[in-house]
Amino acid sequence: MSASQKPLESAATIRHDWQLHEVEALLALPFNDLIFQAQSVHRVYFDPNEIQVSSLLSIKTGSCSEDCGYCPQSARYDSDLNPEALMPVDAVLKAAQQAKEQGASRFCMGAAWRSPKDRDIERVVEMVQGVKALGMETCVTLGMLSDKQTQALKDGGLDYYNHNLDTSEDYYSEIITTRTYQDRLDTLERVRDAGINVCCGGIVGMGESATDRAKLLVQLANMPKHPESVPINMLVQVEGTPLHGTETLDPIVFVRTIAVARILMPQSRVRLSAGRKAMSDEMQALCFLAGANSIFYGDKLLTTDNPMTNHDQQLFERLGVRMGGSSYA
Ligand code: SAM
Ligand code: DTB
Ligand code: SF4
């Protein structure tokens, strides 16, 4: 039976045994069939008119030792960025309060580290506790973690840890050489084993092939438990980074990637992540139709611009979409 003929009642089954050819076939479906299938799956577990919003803050910026080819925060590239040391806790809480007032339900704190030092973790835990006390969910992304650091974050009450696979294992070495795919899988396993919710996705538009996108999705969907949040980032091309000037991805292919992520991981929040600033309102609406039900909200991502909050509010109003608070079905 072809993917387009599958009975809808079985389409939202939670599976962890996706084969590459099945995912490639989904990505290649006629667009209308793909969107119909994604929207049908979406409605099994989620309110289709509710979108979760997270705000991002860069709590430690730039001077990173890694060589991720997309990233303006690597010390190796000349990206016109002002490096900043780890922020004081009170400044972070002030930003979290503002994000809450604008409607964000989750506050994500990102640090440009390969991996944190133990003394950094102590301060990050204070940030997590302070943000939780404001009534928001917490997420941090700090690079690779040791067992001890993971446990300290869990004990501090952290809700989510973001650590992306970024791309397929095959394409990975074209993008990053300073740590391995396995390093990433190891950190993800630690986070999962510690009982912290996993936020894990990737970036498309980095010159990868359709098979690479399919392999990334297979890797995510065949984890023993699906990540609770799956950020799908469109590469933000930053001058000075090696990936600046990469041929841009067909927006329809981006929407297809979102739709297949939704079909493979029916209970996960699929986040329309970086790259929204360069997308039309209509393209974002298509992404929501394809099953994206989370965004980064707030005028800045980590170091690059995101759509203005009033623009997002207007878009939500035009689409009859509500900002939702609940994080996981
Ligand atoms: N340093 C930590 C790490 O790499 O895990 C945490 C911060 S890092 C900036 C978090 C994620 O942001 C990366 O894994 C990548 O997926 C995403 N990212 C960074 N630069 C990006 C860009 N220019 N466009 C799209 N996504 C980007
Ligand atoms: C994720 O998947 N995307 C966010 C968040 N997790 C940390 C980061 C996007 C960064 C885009 C480039 C920048 O603003 O520096
Ligand atoms: Fe450093 Fe993270 Fe940027 Fe890679 S993605 S250079 S690890 S901040």
Image (cartoon, rainbow, N blue to C red):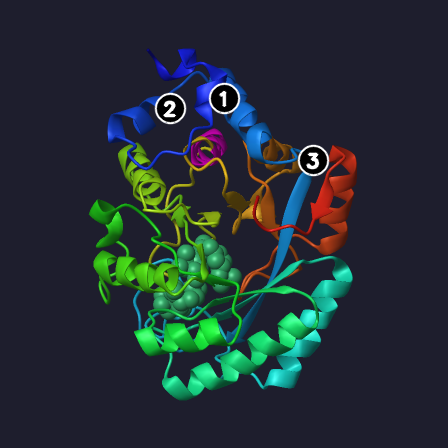
Looking at the picture, which amino acid does disc 1 mark?
A: Gln
Q: In the figure, residue 289 lies in which quadrant?
A: top right
Q: Is the magenta stretch mostly helix, strand or loop?
A: helix
What whole-number distance in Å separates the C-alpha atoms at marks 2 and 1? 10 Å
Answer few, some or many: residues within 10 Å of disc 3's Cα (few below 14, many 20 plus, some between 14 and 19).
some
Q: Do we see residue 84 in this rendering?
A: no
Q: Do the residues labelled 3 and 2 touch (CB within 8 Å)?
A: no
At x 41%, y 14%, the residue is 6
Looking at this view, is 243 or 49 the one in front? 49
Q: Mark 2 points at which residue?
A: 26
Residue 7: x, y in percent? 45, 14
Q: Earlier in the sequence, mark 3 or mark 2?
A: 2
Relative to 22, is 132 above or below? below
Relative to 237, is 3 above or below? above
Q: Earlier in the sequence, mark 1 or mark 3?
A: 1
What whole-number distance in Å separates the C-alpha atoms at marks 1 and 3? 17 Å
Q: Which of marks 2 and 1 is nearer the N terminus?
A: 2
Q: Are marks 2 and 1 in contact (CB under 8 Å)?
A: yes
* Quadrant in which the C terminus is drawn: top right
Q: Which residue lies furthest to the bottom in this view?
A: 119
Looking at this view, is 27 or 189 the one in front? 189
Query: Residue 49 has which mark?
Result: 3
Residue 309: x, y in percent? 72, 54
Relative to 316, is 182 above or below? below
Q: Mark 1 points at which residue?
A: 37
Query: Residue 261 has which mark?
Result: none
Numbered range of the magenta stretch: 251-262
At x 25%, y 25%, the residue is 21
What whole-number distance in Å separates the C-alpha atoms at marks 3 and 2? 24 Å
